[in-house]
Image (cartoon, helix red, strand yellow):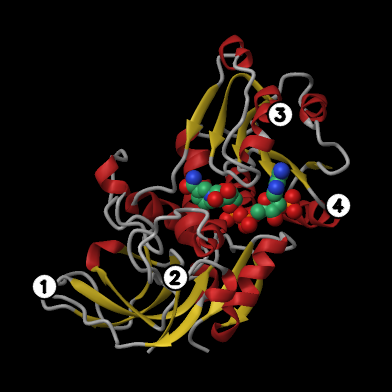
Amino acid sequence: MKAWRIVQFGVDQLEQVETALPAPGPGDVLMRIHAVSLNFRDLLMVKGHYNPKLALPRIPCSDGAGEIVEVGSEVHGWKVGDRVAGIFMQNWLDGQMSSAKTRGALGGDIDGMLAQYVALPAEGIVAIPESLNYEQAATLPCAAVTAWNAVTRAHPVRAGETVLIQGTGGVSIFALQFAMLMGARVIGVSSSDEKLARAKTLGLDAGVNYRQVPDWAPWVLEQTNGDGVDLVVEVGGSGTLQQSLMAVRVAGTVAQIGVLTGVEESLLIAPILHKQIRVQGVYVGSRQDFVDMNRAIAYARLKPVVDQSFAFDNVREALQTMESGLHFGKIVIRVAN
Ligand SMILES: NC(=O)c1ccc[n+]([C@@H]2O[C@H](COP(=O)([O-])OP(=O)(O)OC[C@H]3O[C@@H](n4cnc5c(N)ncnc54)[C@H](OP(=O)(O)O)[C@@H]3O)[C@@H](O)[C@H]2O)c1
C-alpha cells in the first residue's frame, strides 16, 4: 500500500512510500481509508513545530474515514463494510481526560491516517453518520469534536446566547455550525471580507475584519450592548487572548483551543478575576464525545464545509494551501478515488 511519512521535518521532506499492509491483531479492524482531512496540527507536526522530538519516521494526520475490510478474531460489534472514522486520542474513550488517556494520538504519538490502509483497535473507531460521504466524515475527528466540546462542555451554549468565533478555519466553522444548532447567535472576526461574507451564508450574524480592526474587542462589545459574548472559541492564542478576555462577558467563558499566532503571551490578568472569566482549555475530546456529536450531526443533517479536496499524490500542495491560510473550513485528501 501507499502511505506518506515524515522522515525529516518540512513539507518538502514528506515522502510517499510503498509499504506492507498493516496486519490487524485479534482486537483490531483493518480500514481502507477513503479520505483524510488536514488540521493545523498536521502542518505543525510535519514542520517539526508541534513536537521537535517526534519519533521518525511517522505517518501524519489524525483524521481519516473509510470502510472496514477485515476484523480481528476477537472483535465484536463491527463488520466488513462498516463506514467508520478513527478517534483522535486512541486511549480516551469516555469520561474526564487523564494524562494516560492523552497518549496515543493519531499522527503524533502513533502513526496516523495518511495511508491507504490503517489498522486500529476496535474501540478506537466510531461509525460515521449515514448522511455524510467519506470526505465530509474525514473532517470530524479533531476539528469537529473540539468545536463540539467548546460549545457543549467548556460552556454549554444555550439558545439566545452569543458566541464569538475567530477566523474561518476548520474548528471555527464547526463552532459556528454547532453553536447555531443550539440556537445561539454567532459573530466572528476574520482576515477577509470575502470569508466573512461566506460565513454569513452559513448563519454568521456579524463579522469584522481583524486586519482592518486588530483591536476588535470594542466592536464585540458594541455588538452585544456592552455586555460581551457568552463564549469565545479562542483559536488565535497569544495574538488574540487579550482581545478575547476583553470581549467576553462577566462570568463568561473563553474556550482556549488554538495557538495560531503563538503560545506565549504577556497577559493582563486582572480581567480574568474582575470579570470572573472562565478560561477553559479544550483538547479535542473522547470517543463518547465523538459519538454524541455524530448523533447531533445526523439528526440535524449538518454538512461539514469542505473547501477543497486534493488527490493523494498532492499532499504537499494541500499542506501548503493550509499554510497560506486562504482556505475556508476544511481541506481534504482523497485517498481512494
Ligand atoms: N486544542 C485542541 O484540541 C485543538 C483542536 C483542533 C485545533 N486546534 C488548534 O486550533 C487552531 C485552529 O486549528 P484549525 O485546524 O481550525 O486551523 P485552520 O483550519 O488552518 O484555520 C486557521 C484559520 O484561523 C484564522 N486565523 C489565523 N490567525 C488568526 C488571528 N490572529 N485571529 C483570528 N483568526 C485567525 C484564519 O482564518 P481567517 O483567514 O478567516 O482569518 C485561518 O485560516 C490551531 O492553533 C490548532 O492547532 C486545537
Task: Give how far apart the Cα atoms at labels 3 and 1 are.
Answer: 52 Å
Q: Position of residue 335 (x, y in %)?
A: 49, 83
Tell which circle, 2 or 4, labels the residue nearer the N-terminal end: 2
Above/below status of 246 relative to 87: above
Q: Amino acid at mark 1?
A: Glu
Residue located 54% across and 35% down the image: 255
- Quarter of the image that includes the N terminus: bottom left
The residue that disc 4 covers is 193
Above/below status of 152 relative to 203: above
Tell which circle, 4 or 1, labels the residue nearer the N-terminal end: 1
* Mark 3 crowdedness (10 Å alpha carbons): few <14, some 14-19, many ≥20: some
Query: Which labelled disc corresponds to residue 150?
Result: none
Task: Give how far apart the Cα atoms at labels 4 and 1 are.
Answer: 54 Å
Q: Is residue 284 left or right of residue 47?
A: left
User: Residue 6, can we see it?
Assistant: yes
The residue that disc 1 covers is 74
The residue that disc 2 covers is 64
Front tag of 3 and 1: 3
Tell which circle, 3 or 4, labels the residue nearer the N-terminal end: 4
Q: Is residue 125 left or right of residue 269?
A: left
Q: Amino acid at mark 4?
A: Asp
The residue that disc 3 covers is 243
Kindly indicate the quadrant of the structure image that contains residue 141.
bottom left
Q: Amino acid at mark 3?
A: Gln
Q: Amino acid at mark 2?
A: Gly
